[in-house]
Amino acid sequence: MEESRRTEQVDLLQRLKKLTVSLVCCLPLSLLGLLLMLLLIYNSFSAFSLHFDPIPPKSTLSLNYNHHQVLHHHPSLSSSSRSTLTSSSKSDSSMLLAVKETSLGFVQKQKVSPIKTERRTRRRKRRNGLTPAMTQKPQGKSRQKFKTRIKSFLSESSCESLFFMIWISSLESFGERERFTIESLFKSHPNSCLILVSNSLDCERGTLILKPFTDKGLKVLAIKPDFTYIFKDTSAEKWFERLKKGMFSPGVIPLEQNLSNILRLALLYKFGGIYLDTDVIILKPLTSLHNVIGAQTVDPVTRKWSRLNNAVLIFDKNHPLLKSFIDEFSRTFNGNKWGHNGPYLVSRVVARFNVSNSSWDMGFSVLPPSSFYPVDWTRISGFYRASVNGREANWSHKRLMHLRKHSLSVHLWNRESKKLRIEKGSIIQKLMSDSCIFCNSSFLH
Ligand SMILES: *[C@@H]1O[C@H](CO)[C@@H](O)[C@H](O)[C@H]1NC(C)=O
Ligand SMILES: *[C@@H]1O[C@H](CO)[C@@H](O)[C@H](O)[C@H]1NC(C)=O
Ligand SMILES: *[C@@H]1O[C@H](CO)[C@@H](O)[C@H](O)[C@H]1NC(C)=O
Ligand SMILES: *[C@@H]1O[C@H](CO)[C@@H](O)[C@H](O)[C@H]1NC(C)=O
Ligand SMILES: *[C@@H]1O[C@H](CO)[C@@H](O)[C@H](O)[C@H]1NC(C)=O
């Protein structure tokens, strides 16, 4: 099955390529459309075939523990900080990182043998206008640049907290919804800094996209990653070397997605801070949290978490749990299994620590789904729809009140929701109205 899917994909790509070549001279616009369509098809492919496991129905409203309890237990939170969930505070240096997972030539793959990979690389390059010259920078020079630029950004900015996001896709695909994640982030953390790790946004046109923020005095830096520097002195260093040398196959899954999985871990390990995916809306200040990871699902019977997610991570630098994640990634990387290096990885590792109890000893906490993942991906579509009758309106109102009270962020599960229209009066639209800065996004009207 796996094999036939692969063959199908290769076949699809091949056909597209032929079409592309025949069209390229006369119809540049159609070519673009065609490429986009291909991408959509290819994406839905992976979306359908590489899903999360089915999750038992559950009500996030009826969890028997809540984040106040969990926070209460956390060793690094003082008792006074329990009440700080709703009031911003403290000048710690956390960083928010957000990663968007699609394809862009972050890495120059060397001699990765399968033809299909080669083709994928070429397609990617065409799509992003990347040339080998752009991806083969002199390591030493770009490393110096990355390090010094981050340093000077931080020293000039006096960041109350530091946020990182990662955008691995093209500039064009950085749309209104992604920009909104930044809006919501600065709405709750106006004095924080955001480092957007991105190849595509670190250019003049990218600067234009971020200009509304910088014009407002908000501190954001888009910067090309230097993997060698970021992975240095972790087990990811060797993994990356082997990858570059083509010593193992990156697998059928776009390499960039897996890179984003390791990149977020390594960035937090190096700098400390908060990592965020670009499909997260921040509802409340996160600055009082230290060393937390969020549960995505809870076992309805035992009430213990059954899956964690890595879309929001808040950790001090050099945290031992991050090291465990990175070690696990380097040891068990499998580019063919969706989620294996991401959400499943963090769940796998934390499970080994019998977290219901001894998480403590490692100095981290697991927050309940209501904190970061209040709506499951299987139910996200309901949050984009307006109520059509009184019963729905009641439900929607109750849900909204609960979210405003208990949730710190909402993960929108872009994979499921990016094609959904944000209807006027929907829960998502109301949350976005709460969290906007410019409040002129098309979906707010
Ligand atoms: C929203 O406002 C910002 C800042 O004033 C502006 O730069 C941006 O172009 C506006 N966006 C839209 C969609 O109107
Ligand atoms: C690598 O990233 C792809 C991108 O979607 C993902 O499907 C795949 O599961 C990842 N591989 C692993 C081992 O996580
Ligand atoms: C977790 O529990 C299992 C069995 O319940 C035990 O074998 C294992 O050693 C425990 N791990 C830790 C880190 O305490
Ligand atoms: C968890 O830890 C507490 C305190 O150390 C202990 O009393 C309790 O028995 C432990 N529970 C489990 C399931 O190990
Ligand atoms: C909505 O809730 C209100 C009170 O909470 C109730 O009086 C009303 O009957 C409900 N409407 C519907 C259609 O369920």
Image: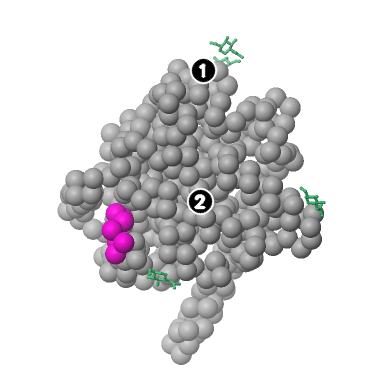
Residue 145 placement, left or right of 58: left
Q: Earlier in the sequence, mark 1 or mark 2?
A: 2
Give percent across and percent down for residue 117: 46, 58
Could you say which is closer to the camera, residue 169 or residue 296? 296
**Snapshot colouring:** one colour
69 is higher (above) or lower (below) than 172: above
Are the two marked residues, 1 and 2, in contact with CB atoms closer than 8 angstroms?
no
Could you say which is closer to the camera, residue 95 or residue 198? 95
Disc 2 designates what residue?
280
Residue visible at 63% across and 56% down in the picture? 427
Which labelled disc corresponds to residue 171? none
Is residue 91 visible in the rendered image? The answer is yes
Give percent across and percent down for residue 127: 43, 70
Ligand 3 lies under 8 Å from the Cβ of mark 1: yes
268 is higher (above) or lower (below) than 122: above
Residue visible at 31% across and 56% down in the picture? 218
Task: Using a 10 Å C-alpha cutoff, classify the residue at mark 1 as few (fewer than 14 neighbours), some (14 to 19) or many (20 or more).
Answer: few
Residue 386 placement, left or right of 150: right
Disc 1 designates what residue?
358
Q: Which residues are magenta?
A: 214-220
Tag 2's secondary structure?
strand
Give percent across and percent down for residue 202: 30, 61
